[in-house]
Amino acid sequence: MQDGKRFPLNAWYAAAWGHEIRRELAARKVCGKDMVLYRRGDGVVAALEDACWHRLVPLSLGKLVGDDVMCGYHGIRFDAAGRCTFMPAQKTINPSACVRAFPAVERHRMVWVWPGDPALADPAKVPDFHWNDGDEWVGEGGTYYDLKCDYRLIIDNLMDLTHETYVHAGSIGHDAITDTPFETTHTDRMATVTRWMIGIEPPPFWARQLGKPGIVDRWQIIRFEAPGIVVGDVGVAPAGTGAAQGDRSQGVNGAFLAALTPATETTCHYHWNFVRTFRKGDHQLTRNIQVAHFGDGKGVYDEDVVFLQAQQEAIDRNPRQPFYNLNIDAGALWARKLIDQMIATETGRVAFPSAAG
Amino acid sequence: MQDGKRFPLNAWYAAAWGHEIRRELAARKVCGKDMVLYRRGDGVVAALEDACWHRLVPLSLGKLVGDDVMCGYHGIRFDAAGRCTFMPAQKTINPSACVRAFPAVERHRMVWVWPGDPALADPAKVPDFHWNDGDEWVGEGGTYYDLKCDYRLIIDNLMDLTHETYVHAGSIGHDAITDTPFETTHTDRMATVTRWMIGIEPPPFWARQLGKPGIVDRWQIIRFEAPGIVVGDVGVAPAGTGAAQGDRSQGVNGAFLAALTPATETTCHYHWNFVRTFRKGDHQLTRNIQVAHFGDGKGVYDEDVVFLQAQQEAIDRNPRQPFYNLNIDAGALWARKLIDQMIATETGRVAFPSAAG
Amino acid sequence: MQDGKRFPLNAWYAAAWGHEIRRELAARKVCGKDMVLYRRGDGVVAALEDACWHRLVPLSLGKLVGDDVMCGYHGIRFDAAGRCTFMPAQKTINPSACVRAFPAVERHRMVWVWPGDPALADPAKVPDFHWNDGDEWVGEGGTYYDLKCDYRLIIDNLMDLTHETYVHAGSIGHDAITDTPFETTHTDRMATVTRWMIGIEPPPFWARQLGKPGIVDRWQIIRFEAPGIVVGDVGVAPAGTGAAQGDRSQGVNGAFLAALTPATETTCHYHWNFVRTFRKGDHQLTRNIQVAHFGDGKGVYDEDVVFLQAQQEAIDRNPRQPFYNLNIDAGALWARKLIDQMIATETGRVAFPSAAG
């Protein structure tokens, strides 16, 4: 059943890549909230409600004046905290004039915003996305903005890689994924699916990366962090060289990174990257891997998008039809359970404010 | 008033031309049901619900494996009866896993499906559409898929050919149609409108087909078979050569065939053909007649489509406005009455299940 | 709050420019009413409901036969009073067969229609739009049809010209508009905003029109006539030549004319003109001024349209969010109050018919 709330508001969500936010106004919708993002003169990112206090005109149609946002319609200005600093044709500023400011943090090459109660926004709780940092891992990703599906459908997709066998048969799919058992573990914020495929033929993509003939041991260790982060530690090593026991030195290791952000109940932004620890200086490889994921509708993720959006359309046509589950859904079910727990906590807080106080 | 149910479910509806269904998956929406159609190895057509039991992904995005449909997302397979035959990564198949199978029959060059209660689906009740069969009649038709109107508006259109005088003034229209009285008869499943125009100038289309100068006797005998079939026996013969008395040997005789299938309450598929008994070997004539009906927006049916879709838009804007009727609507009113009787019978069955048992 | 009725029905609204209505059928939607307009043989404009009595097909798909409108589907005809004058295939015309006729008047180069109670339609109450008449003023305007915003957002826009400073910074905007106080006056049908900017640098547009160097006195006298007319008397004169005291002889004077007509609650038609009393024979200037307002998305009004439609989208997303007001909104607030009074009068009339009698 696809009823009920679909996302918590009290959470950090990726709103943009850091390099996308400059000294100009950028509109983003996160969890149903229209936001305008920009970088202040000191480099800090600010996020305001994208609707002027006066008459609701999107502030993102205006411009930046110093560190203030000026509405393009009548020139009203708001500072990075959302306080009105100028009103046209009047000296006294209405003291109640303001727009909502959203907590924003820049970390791991992403801008994170908190659409819920600002008092609860703890920067220490920004999800772990360190693979994007420093030079241990290399890769260039991208974003699907306003994808027409519930963000949780993408979580389902990434937490169960058996779909690779069918959707991505020509690149990373392999019958071994379907045939190999996996383990699921979880904490109160994370769920992990671990699958080791021992002594298999590598699929085309991984055979090319490894560059050595012969069978391999392949791993997929997928970790979900509620509500919207999925990181997959993936790779292959020549069979029997100890990868499953901890020695990956003979193999090649990558990680897919997904930061999923609800725009509305049925649309989302899919920030993705694929990073690696091998051939890090090979820029052509970086570019090739990027295109292999997102390439004029022919990349691996483009293949997923066809299914994800068709699935959402089917859900919209049949809103009361239940989802049935298979064994392969164990990881996704834990992910959804952790999301539901966040929503329940948040809704409880709203429902019983005295208890929350 | 355009309220209430608009189509019965317990009926055979044309879902496709036979040649459109091959050894691959084809999606069709019939009476609000998403279906996937395909031809089994033995040539028999199967129709399943186009939504995987697991997570609703349209099965039509998958592929055929033998006579089973494999979901393109996770590889789950269903046989032509809708039973699950394979689940990824598990040996035991959930015994409740299935998708709905719809009764399907191929007859008269069309594939017919039954969207209602399968127990009531009697192949003997497939509508009479024999003009499509054999070599007595010749013609090549087509289909307007997802026309943006209630299928009953097309029945209104075909059951009252006075509209030809106005909509098709340049081809088959003629003041005589409006000026000539007609007779309406009916049974519990069929309604027939008969109009004989004696001693008139033939309209351009028929003058060309007859190829003889002078006035003609023209006939239009339109037969509706509930809920969605209209067949029009039409033609002209030189005036006074006995056509009205049964001898059409001096004339030319055609038949327009319409199989109308609701997709939703306000969209439908219009399968049409125009067949004839004269100059049957003249393939260029066959092609010309096809183009005259459906030709880059300029055919006779294209002229109708403009009115049909505009009428539906007007109904949507004014849902409570009544339809007023003219004498010319006698045939269409009978057609709608027969449809309503089918709906009432079906609804009664649902409303009083013990009585139905 | 954007609730409640948004426009009165008992009012004259501009439906078209006079030259647009010829001896053929033209569709217009006014206050939610679909109308078909045409010019009778004697030159008088008629307006009928654009939906055939029979089956709702838009009459505008038909054609004019003499002074009657013939439905294009079945040939039913209606005269300019909406009475049915012909039914196909029957001699007796159903006496109740008719379509609604709307009062229509042609004046000031516009066609005005009255979507409400015809008994109240007094041609003497057509709004004053005389600037369009005769040869005292010269100009060529145009129409934005089906603009995607509530017509009142355009009234807000025109009644507060401080927006020129921000939206039209490159042409007619000037900080002086924002910095100069203004006066607001009103009657029971009109509201007027008067702003005199004494001794300012002229903005680029007006400097070009005046053609004399030096500072100017600039005026903006904006008059609203409920429910949809705004006329702005605007111009500049060399500073200190007595314009504010009534002698504009050294200056240049123009007037912007706006006739705003609701199509639906959230769409409207914006008939506009900009007329002037200077260089009246300069046709190139007439054309240049027209393009400066409406030019491939780059004119002054095109700049407004971006904000107006974005504002409507924001209102649609946040229907319960209040509008806050600034001092600059004084004129717009009076305009909305006068509209609301018309609606209240009209609703009262409907609610207490005995009192109205």
Image (spheres, coloured by chain):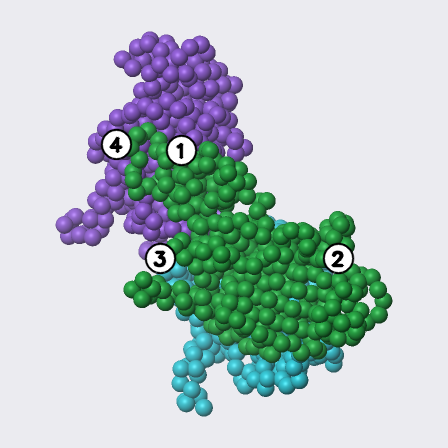
Chain colours: A cyan, B purple, C green
Q: Earlier in the sequence, mark 2 or mark 1?
A: 1
For the residue labelled by badge 2, is the local secondary structure a helix, a strand or a loop?
Answer: loop
The kind of residue on which mark 4 rests is: Met
Q: Which residue is mark 2?
A: C278
Q: Which residue is mark 3?
A: B94
In x, y percent, where is residue B97?
A: 35, 55
| Same chain check for tags 2 and 1 | yes
Q: Residue at x 41, y 89 (%)?
A: A355
Q: Which residue is mark 4?
A: B190
Q: Residue at x 33, y 16 (%)?
A: B198
Q: Is B188 left or right of A160, judged from the image as shown?
A: left
Closer to viewer: mark 2 or mark 4: 2
Q: Are marks 2 and 4 in contact (CB under 8 Å)?
A: no
Q: Chain of mark 1?
A: C
Q: Residue at x 67, y 73 (%)?
A: C195
**Considering depth in this image, is B143 or B215 the residue closer to the camera?**
B215
Q: Are marks 2 and 3 in contact (CB under 8 Å)?
A: no
C-alpha separation, residue under disc 1 versus residue under disc 4: 27 Å
Give the quadrant of residue C50: top left
C-alpha separation, residue under disc 2 versus residue under disc 4: 75 Å
C-alpha separation, residue under disc 4 versus residue under disc 3: 46 Å
Q: Earlier in the sequence, mark 4 or mark 3?
A: 3
For the residue labelled by badge 4, is the local secondary structure a helix, a strand or a loop?
Answer: strand
